[in-house]
Image: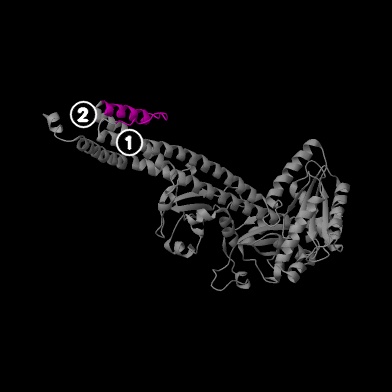
Amino acid sequence: MYLSMLAKYSLRTQIALLFGALVAATVVLVALGFGEWIQRDAQREAGRALQLIAGNAARTLADGLHERAVQTRVLADAEMVWRKGLGSPEVQNMLMRTQARQQHTAWVGMADTQGKVMAATGGLLVGQSVAARPWFQKGLEGPFVGDVQQALLLGSLLERPPGAEPARFVDFSAPVRVDGRLVGVVGMHGSWEWTGDVIESLIALEAARAGLEVFVFDREGAPIYAPAKRMQALSQAGQRAPATNAAKGSPQVVDWLDGERALSANVQLPTHNSVSNLGWQVVARQPIAQAYARSTGVVRRALLVGLAAAGIAALLSWLLARRLSEDLQNLARAASNVNAGAHEAAIPLRGSSREVFELSSAMAHMTARMLQANDEMEEQVRLRTQQLEQANQELDRQARTDALTGLLNRRGFEAQIGFALALAARNLQPLSVVTLDVDHFKRINDRYGHAVGDAVLQRLARLLPEHLRASDIVARVGGEEFVALLPSTDTAGAMKVAQALLDAVAAAADPDVGELTLSAGVASLRNLQDSRAALLQRSDEALYTAKQAGRNRVCMTP
């Protein structure tokens, strides 16, 4: 009776009814069964990108805090300079050089044991008391890194653009001792604008357009950095650091108090030591609509579901309509082969009826498109994986390279000198360092402008390697300061190399400023226990001696 009722309908009607029911069932299945699966996959993919960016930002910020803390301790250990008096011109020059070498350094000063400022960059706060400031009180006890805060004394003395937010700083300090006796505290105020520059340098333009943002929260979970002037709104709303499951690599969807529902990844700053460990947290977020927009697995899984549904539909058609021709059975078998992943399988074209021919033709084209789309998706995944690896390599290269000159920066140089020290100790070979500084570089900037000054530095960066061996390493470690690492070179050899560099620079008249001279300080490895910091400090002291002796000369540390 049932079959006789079907016989009253045309083949087209029967196929339409059957596939209509199948499509409805498939839609329900996808909506209920695969919706959550697809969303989790999209969250994992976007979360990995957020985790990577937050992790890179956290490492860079931690390295910056540690580097400034180390630089403050190096200043405090310059006992030879402190002996000349806390307010001496030598101390003042050392503080100014330190500020010039370190970008975003707002103030460097020296206070005696009573808290009176004896010397400072720009003469700011000289003669005033900082005894009540935390950086001074903690600095009397040992090296100190203070959390970000407004500078009560210094903030009113620094020029700020109209309408700008109040200046905020991170404090660094260390005790100064001469002959084992505490004589004062050296302090450094790092501008908080450094954080924004670091984060902006790590976020690609495409990521920013995709709505990706990075925030920094303090140890208590309060926001201390937010992009695009969101800081005030988040603070007033009482936003706290999102408690994501970042430790397991699982960023989560968080409802932020500024009304944004975003996928968020939270990374704790890595700890170099207890001094520079401020407990900061870096949070990267991306709005849900944009975070899930590029899920590479959604289309492929949808295609697999479609193939499975086609196989089930073919099987149901065979069970419910045995009277269908052999052509439909062949179509069902071919669809099953395609569903099983056989790329050589094809849907045959059958012409026993117009309906069967149209059906077989449509299925053949659909299968070809799906297989092609699957191949294209696999190729896209491979290309995106390759692009991510290249992006990571480029980020690492940029982190170690000076943007102006193309030479190694301080971070890249310190990695090289660490390796050179280990190699010299292993092979019992000499090792020397030459620190070079452009004489009267400030006059060049003041007279010709910073663009000419930058051009001078770029020409020096091309000239210096021409007079060094292939095994030697040269880096730019400050504004106009360069350093050359000379493996297998003793003091006498290093003095000759340094003098050759000075002669080459003096002989090559600069097209913009004419005569240009350098001063150089030479230091060599004394013994196997000699440290990187000690070697660089002696080289700096020798450079200082060369400057004091009239410039355009080479001096060495005995």
What secondary structure is marked by label 1? helix
Please say whether residue 338 is one of the residues in the magenta stretch. yes
**Please, what is the three-letter code of the amino acid marked with disc 2?**
Ala
Q: Residues within 10 Å of mark 2 (few under 14, many from 20)?
A: some
Q: Position of residue 246 (x, y in %)?
A: 48, 45
Q: Earlier in the sequence, mark 1 or mark 2?
A: 2
Instruction: Check the image and report above or below for 419 versus 115.
Output: above
Is residue 192 visible to the viewer in this orientation of the structure? Answer: no
Q: Position of residue 326 (x, y in %)?
A: 26, 25
545, 409: nearer the viewer: 409
Is residue 154 visible to the viewer in this orientation of the structure? Answer: yes
Q: Which dot marks residue 321?
A: 2
The residue depicted at 88 percent of the width and 50 percent of the height is 496
Span shown in magenta: 326-350
Task: Answer left or right for 164 relative to 484.
Answer: left
Report the residue marked by disc 1.
361
125, 97: nearer the viewer: 97
The residue depicted at 84 percent of the width and 44 percent of the height is 489
**Please, what is the three-letter code of the amino acid marked with disc 1?**
Ser
Instruction: Check the image and report above or below for 392 versus 452.
Output: above
Task: Answer left or right for 351 relative to 82.
Answer: left
* Displayed quadrant of residue 69: bottom right
Q: Position of residue 263 (x, y in %)?
A: 43, 50
